[in-house]
Amino acid sequence: MRRNIITVPIRKVQRQEAIGPHDPPVHGVPAQDFLAVEEPLEIRLALKNDERNVAITMRTPGNDEELAVGFLFTEGILRSADSISGITNPARNVLTVSLVTKDGDENSDSESAIDLERLERHFYLSSSCGVCGKASIQAIEASGCTAPPRDRPVLDREVIHQLPAALRSRQMAFDRTGGLHAAALFDPAGTLLELREDVGRHNAVDKLIGAAILDHTSLTQVSPGHSSAVPLHDRILMVSGRASFELVQKALMAGVAVMAAVGAPSSLAVETALRFGMTLAGFVRNGRFNVYSGVGRFQEKDGLAAHERRS
């Protein structure tokens, strides 16, 4: 198993006020520190006898199959796990997703074959930005993304308040490194169902969505006819950082109706959430949060949607 955390030698330097008035000063004391691993992953797509590089992303090793499947799904390339005939790891930091053609034989012709020539775009993704150049609501609509149901899940504001602590309690790698983003899926009662961590916040979400698509099957033995958990209409997505457009886009592609973030949303994230009827909450921490869209999903007793119903 690949390591996602390594130790490195360091020299500690601290000011006196940071360590207490009666403690000896710390100047160049040797110690060990834990770092989150960051390495490239090349995602390749194979159809019939053709294989192309689709993306290269910087990620924390682990759950690579989920990352590849989640990325391909949220980019509109894959529709379901039924499209996958197999996932292989031909070399270090390389993953190939093989697709099933129309009649189930990857060596046969198919009217619905994906145009690999068109898809061969070398996305060199940094850990923080994800796929650049696709930030438009029209691009989401063109990919076939549809709005989630507007009447579910029904939300309790107290559940939203509880999400950050539940998320933080399961961030095992973050506890050791302080350098990983997290994304988690909750049910409407606030039960944490799945969590993934990565140096890239977009990767954490892709891993989470990929896990839902593959639904814990053997990743090397995905078979046609498999039913996944997507769309995630009755799930709440919680992220440990800000809510960017890209994360909202990925959530919508997976059918997520409710997204909450510890940090702030961007203007395009809010615009997109409003367009698709997603409930988007930001600054979810310290007993408060802001609702930027989709307030109607909250229970009447919470009073959040009272003005919306009167108007």
Image: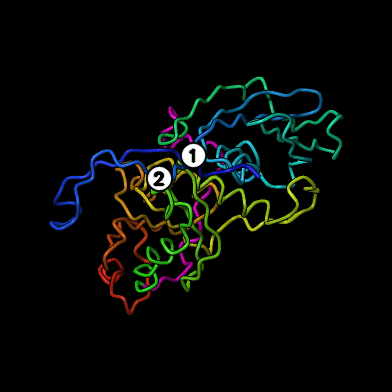
Q: Nearer the viewer, residue 122 or 204?
A: 204
Q: Residue furthest bottom?
A: 301
**Mark 1 residue type:** Ile
Which numbered marker is on residue 183?
A: none
Q: Residues within 10 Å of mark 2 (few under 14, many from 20)?
A: some
Q: Position of residue 50 (x, y in %)?
A: 76, 22
State the residue in front, 104 or 294: 104
Q: Going from the N terminus, do you reach mark 2 or mark 1 first?
A: 1
Name the quarter where the N terminus is drawn: top right
**116 lies above or below 86:** above
Amino acid type for the residue under numbered disc 2: Gly
Magenta stretch, main secondary structure, is: loop
Q: Magenta region: which residues? A: 132-156
**Mark 1, secondary structure of its residue:** helix
State the residue at coordinates (25%, 41%): 13
Dot 2 corresponds to which residue? 179
Query: Which label is found at residue 140?
Result: 1
Residue depicted at 32% across the width and 38% down the height: 11
Give x and y (percent) for residue 146. 53, 49
Indicate left or right for 19 with 244 as reference. Answer: left
Expressed as whole percent of the image width and height from the top left, the position of residue 132 reads 43, 29
